[in-house]
Image: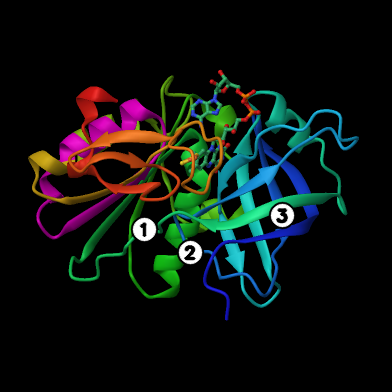
């Protein structure tokens, strides 16, 4: 059994628009590669299909893994050249993939309360985590923050997570950020028996991490960094932590919120 990340040629099975600027790509997973778990990511070598625009590999978190069919999904936002190319991938297109990479979320079963907080491109890994917890009979609350109702995805897995939706402009659900919602509605319920899992924009991670610190809760955050090698070799993705500079692609992307030097991020 292979336990290290594997490089292989995968094939796109589906690639659909989910919401404003967001897509979900379904990919074949190599059955000899390790099973991805929530929090881990893959890198894809994206080009224009003619070999004339080879880009650095782009990292994306797994949003699901189906072991029976050997299929993985990623949810991605079109941000620049690589993700624009990815959005044009058709069924059957071959993609050079490496994974699974990075550390997964360590689910703390000693604590009984689990709060999942997702914002923007953090949606994919947190949907994976939500279904992973459900499959182990661990109940969780799911708080999703986005700019407006145009960013709310219409997929069953999202509805199944029973999300509490927050929009910046109040066009759907709670008006305000996910952190605003937590502060206004569930703060007293957060304590030493709570783990908060978060993935999304940096301001959201900072706020959530502070809430957890103030309430003596455990907090695991998924950090993002621009990556070159994606496998720990170039030191291009380091973030400041209490243990010195840590690589998002190797020691992360999952970090304990209390270990991150937020003021230097
Ligand atoms: C561990 C990890 C997991 C990720 N998971 C997801 C995911 O599940 N879904 C998703 O949509 N994206 C995810 N990302 C971000 C994704 O890798 C970038 O959006 C993608 O590489 C952008 O490529 P591009 O060629 O389209 O953009 P580029 O043309 O390379 O850049 C476009 C703009 O986006 C900015 N940018 C690019 N990458 C990043 C980054 N990593 N952080 C901050 N700004 C950036 C650039 O500075 C530039 O302004 C993840 C990143 C990491 C490190
Ligand atoms: S991207 Fe090279 S060490 Fe992380």
Q: Tell me the element at label 2.
A: loop
* Magenta segment boundaries in residue numbering: 186-211
Residue lying farthest front? 233
Q: Nearer the viewer, residue 141 or 81?
A: 81
Q: Tell me the element at label 1.
A: loop
Earlier in the chain: of badge 3 and badge 2, it is 3
Q: Identify the residue at image location x=56%, y=70%.
A: 35
Q: Identify the residue at image location x=20%, y=66%.
A: 112
Do the residues under discs 3 and 1 have CB atoms within 8 angstroms?
A: no
Q: Residue 13 location, x and y as percent?
A: 80, 56
- The label nearer to you, 3 versus 2, is 2
Q: Is residue 87 left or right of residue 109?
A: right
Q: Residue 22 location, x and y as percent?
A: 64, 35
Q: Quadrant of the C terminus?
A: top left
Q: Which residue is mark 3?
A: 26
Badge number at residue 265 = none
Q: Which residue is mark 2?
A: 37
Q: Identify the residue at image location x=71%, y=54%.
A: 26
Crowding around mark 2 (Cα neighbors within 10 Å: few <14, some 14 to 19, many 20+) is many
Q: Which residue is mark 1?
A: 105
Q: Is residue 101 left or right of residue 220?
A: right
């Amino acid at each position: 059994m292979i336990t290290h990340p594997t490089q292989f040629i995968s094939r796109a099975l589906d690639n659909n628009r989910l919401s404003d600027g967001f897509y979900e790509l379904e990919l074949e997973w190599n059955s000899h590669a390790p099973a991805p778990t929530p929090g881990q990511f893959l890198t894809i070598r994206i080009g224009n299909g003619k070999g004339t625009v080879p880009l650095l590999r782009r990292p994306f978190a797994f949003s699901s893994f189906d072991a029976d069919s050997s299929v993985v999904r990623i949810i991605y936002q079109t941000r620049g050249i690589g993700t624009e190319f990815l959005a044009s991938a058709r069924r059957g297109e071959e993609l050079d993939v490496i994974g699974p990479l990075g550390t997964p979320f360590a689910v703390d079963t000693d604590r009984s309360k689990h709060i999942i907080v997702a914002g923007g491109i953090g949606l994919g890994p947190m949907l994976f985590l939500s279904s992973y917890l459900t499959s182990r009979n661990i109940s969780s609350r799911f708080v999703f923050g986005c700019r407006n109702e145009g960013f709310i995805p219409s997929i069953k897995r999202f509805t199944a997570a029973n999300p509490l939706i927050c929009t910046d402009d109040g066009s759907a659900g709670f008006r305000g950020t996910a952190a605003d919602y937590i502060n206004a509605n569930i703060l007293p319920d957060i304590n030493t028996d709570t783990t908060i899992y978060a993935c999304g924009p940096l301001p959201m991670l900072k706020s959530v991490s502070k809430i957890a610190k103030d309430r003596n809760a455990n907090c695991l955050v998924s950090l993002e960094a621009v990556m070159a090698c994606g496998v720990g070799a170039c030191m291009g993705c380091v973030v400041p932590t209490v243990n010195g500079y840590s690589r998002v692609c190797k020691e992360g992307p999952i970090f304990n919120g209390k270990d991150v030097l937020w003021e230097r991020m």
